[in-house]
Amino acid sequence: MSGKTSPESPLPIRTVLQMVAGWIGKLGTIWVEGQITELTARGGTVFLTLRDPVANVSARVTAPRGVYEATVPRPADGARVVVHVKPDFWVNRGSFAFTALEIRPVGVGELLARLERLRQLLAAEGLFGAERKRRLPFLPGTVGLICGRDSAAERDVLENSRRRWPAVRFKVEQVAVQGPYAVPEVTEALQRLDADKEVDVIIVARGGGSLEDLLPFSDESLVRAVSACRTPVVSAIGHEQDTPLLDLVADLRASTPTDAAKKVVPDVGEQLTLIRQLRDRGRRVVGGWLDRERSWLASVRSRPALADPVREIERRAEQVEALRDRTRRALGGSLDRAEDSLTHLRARLVTLSPAATLERGYAIVQLPSGEVVRQAKGIGAGEVLTIRLTDDRLTVRTEPEQGADPAPAAKPARARKPRKKPEDAVPDALPME
């Protein structure tokens, strides 16, 4: 079209608008979703403004009264709806609008189903994992607070925090906490506070509201922005029963803004009490340990070995002397018994010894071979015999019996002095009876 026009031959505005209307008319019908922000009825037509729930974008929608009244329940201002529309361009006014063919309200059940699907998607990505949760600082130097403008949530957090720790500092970002501007403003404030190195923890606070009012805090872009923060984030949205997705991705969830102040800022009174209790407990523990050690030391010192060490040595010396005397008595008794036994054995040996028999006048006759002569039979004349007496012995030669031929006179053999033996020695043979 630009090639066919020039300053000398421009197109009339009606032609251009008719061409625009033709292009828009070719789009056909589509389903759109949004939030009703303005609703007015004039005659047989209902005029409403359909705003995007996240971005600052809106469009005019006209609906015949029959289409509007056929919707059950009838949508009111602020309701989320899905509309089957046909885009129209009004040539006479040069304006664009949608014509509603059917309106369907988005109920709570549908919203909850959408949130559940989004929750499962983000959970599968690991955004809600416990290992991603960061621990809050014990005493933050500066606390970042994102809240509504002049809201009760802001007052609750500030007043309770300063009541607990008067020296705590805050950087407050006042933003829209519901409506189409909530998500971008909260996200921008979150990024500013996260980039500030003085901020140690960030609180996102909002009071209670309906499910539709809290929908911005379940927006996917905001949830991902919180997960990307390097600073710990505390979610304090609504009341205890409200659970937007921001609660799941935050490092800590607080049931209310007041609860967030209690969890982020420690109570100086409670900390002083805790310090005093710990100090007293430490003193009791150390005192008890010292008392036990003193008791143990006194018990050890009272033992005889340490109380009177010389007495213990004397007692041991007495034991040694007693053992020594007992050993002497035992050894002396053993020697006495052995001596008595030896005396008895000696007396028995003396009694049974052949020497005792010889002392009574008996003698022992032995052949040169040492054999004892027990009878005269078998002893020839002239045999040399040894006669053993008590103290010595004689060597003799036998003579023939009377009446026999005289044998040559035997030369008396020279007696040899026998070797002395002790009295208790056993002789070579018993005396002959």
Image (spheres, rainbow, N blue to C red):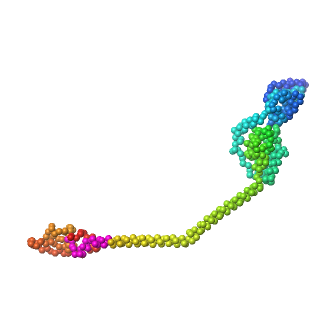
Indicate yes or no whether the magenta region holds residue 16.
Answer: no
Q: Where the C terminus falls, by quadrant? A: bottom left
Residue 188 visible from this viewpoint: no
- The one of 130 and 414 positioned closer to us in this rendering: 130
Report whether 404 appears left or right of 100.
left
Q: Position of residue 64 (x, y in %)?
A: 85, 27
Residue at position x 59%, y 68% from top?
Answer: 302
Above or below for 269 versus 63: below
Main secondary structure of the magenta stretch: helix
Q: Where the N terminus falls, by quadrant? A: top right
Residue at position x 76%, y 44% from top?
Answer: 240
Above or below for 384 versus 54: below
Q: Quadrant of residue 289?
A: bottom right
Above or below for 237 versus 266: above
Above or below for 388 versus 31: below
Indicate yes or no whether the magenta region holds residue 362.
Answer: yes
Q: Quadrant of residue 28?
A: top right
Count of numbered tags: 0
Report whether 249 appears left or right of 5.
left
Report whether 218 appears left or right of 291.
right
Residue at position x 80%, y 44% from top?
Answer: 207
**Residue most extreme to the right:** 8
Q: Position of residue 126 (x, y in %)?
A: 70, 40
Residue 293 visible from this viewpoint: yes
Q: Position of residue 341 (x, y in %)?
A: 35, 71
User: Magenta part of the protein: which range?
Assistant: 345-365
Q: Position of residue 290 (x, y in %)?
A: 65, 63
Q: Quadrant of residue 282?
A: bottom right
